[in-house]
Image: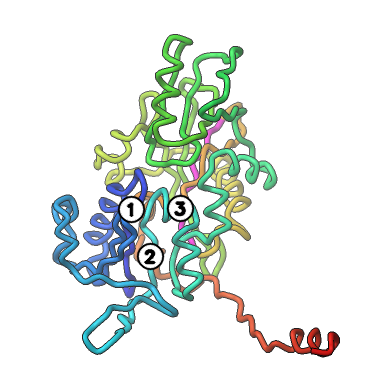
Amino acid sequence: MNLCLLFGGKSYEHEISIVSAIALKKLLPKIKHFVFLDSNHNFYLIPKEQMQSKFFSTKSYEKTQKIYPKKDGFYTRTLFGEKPLNLPVILNLIHGGDGEDGTLASLLDFYGIPYIGPRNPACVLSYDKELIKGFAASRGVKCLAHRVLYRNDLVPSDLEFPIIIKPARLGSSLGIQVVESQENLQYALDSAFEYDEKVIIEPFIEGIKEYNLAGFKGKDGIQFSFIEEPEKSKFLDFEKKYLDFSRTSNAKEAEISDALKQALQESFTRLYNNAFEGALIRCDFFIKDNDCYLNEINPVPGSLANYLFTDFKSALESLLLALPKPSDIKVDYALLHQIQFAKGK
């Protein structure tokens, strides 16, 4: 498969992105190209044989070839000038800031570099848990009631416990706390505010059913993964999500009715169409009183949610054939000439 994995980035999820890239390297051994974006926003071309955790934790990557983006691709500098690397299509594996907030999408689009991943408008919406709720509502998909709190806001006195507190612009389950009573509220807020200036407060519903569904738009329309019902105690925290690798490698299809499967797929389609083209995303849903509620959209899911597909390689190949093409805008200065002529200049 002719792809280039781009990973790292300046975010709290930097290490998770490295884990995702290493996982996909093992899953798709024919991929030969790896580009690492460090926390100082330097790009490095990483040899395939160095795609190991210790290589990054020891900062050995700093000895590898530095590269930079320019029109139509990445380049390196040599004694004889610039040299294009002619890398294949980029696969965005940068979680959180840079990769999911729209920064990377804007950079790649600006330079005309083709890539798999959410485009800037989709990033802006899905990166913020408050904005995505409004977007979902506009698409006819329900969300749980929520409140937004900024760092310097007064804490509401009418909260009904238990609640769940989440940083508004963060993934990987970092900073999330379930609060059972008023006594634990301030600690949970402080924990969330370590990661973001804005937090989301939602009711915590014990035992609510949760389902994960990934998918993308190929040439033949939306293609879905199987639907997973993640095992969890209270919620899928960071340790359960990323340190328990058996969860993802042994993910199993949920045993649900055809009606529920259809409802989840319909909700996914409403959210994806005309927003997330070019990306493989994962939507996490709740089922409450037989209704489907969006929990969140993960536009660059961990390891690209490969564990939810029975044939992940074929899924990526299908997505590659359906990437959005940028508009070809030609500037001929005809209007400028008309304006100047009218002004007599």
Of residues 327 and 153, the one drawn nearer to the viewer in this rendering: 153
Q: What residue type is labelled 2?
A: Leu
Alpha carbon separation for disc pair 2 and 3: 13 Å
Q: Position of residue 275 (x, y in %)?
A: 60, 58
Q: Quadrant of the N terminus?
A: bottom left
Q: Residue at 45% of width from left, 14% of height from top?
A: 180
Q: Which of marks 2 and 3 is nearer the N terminus?
A: 2
Q: What residue type is labelled 1?
A: Ser
Q: Could you classify mark 1 by the number of other residues whose Cα lies within 10 Å: few (under 14), some (14-19), or many (20 or more)?
A: many
Predominant SS of the magenta segment: strand
* Residue annotated with mark 1: 303
- The image shows residue 253, relative to residue 114, as above or below, that is above
Q: Position of residue 225 (x, y in %)?
A: 44, 53
Alpha carbon separation for disc pair 1 and 3: 14 Å
Give the SS element for disc 1.
Answer: helix
Extreme residue in the front direction: 345
**In magenta stretch: residue 284:** yes
* Residue annotated with mark 2: 91
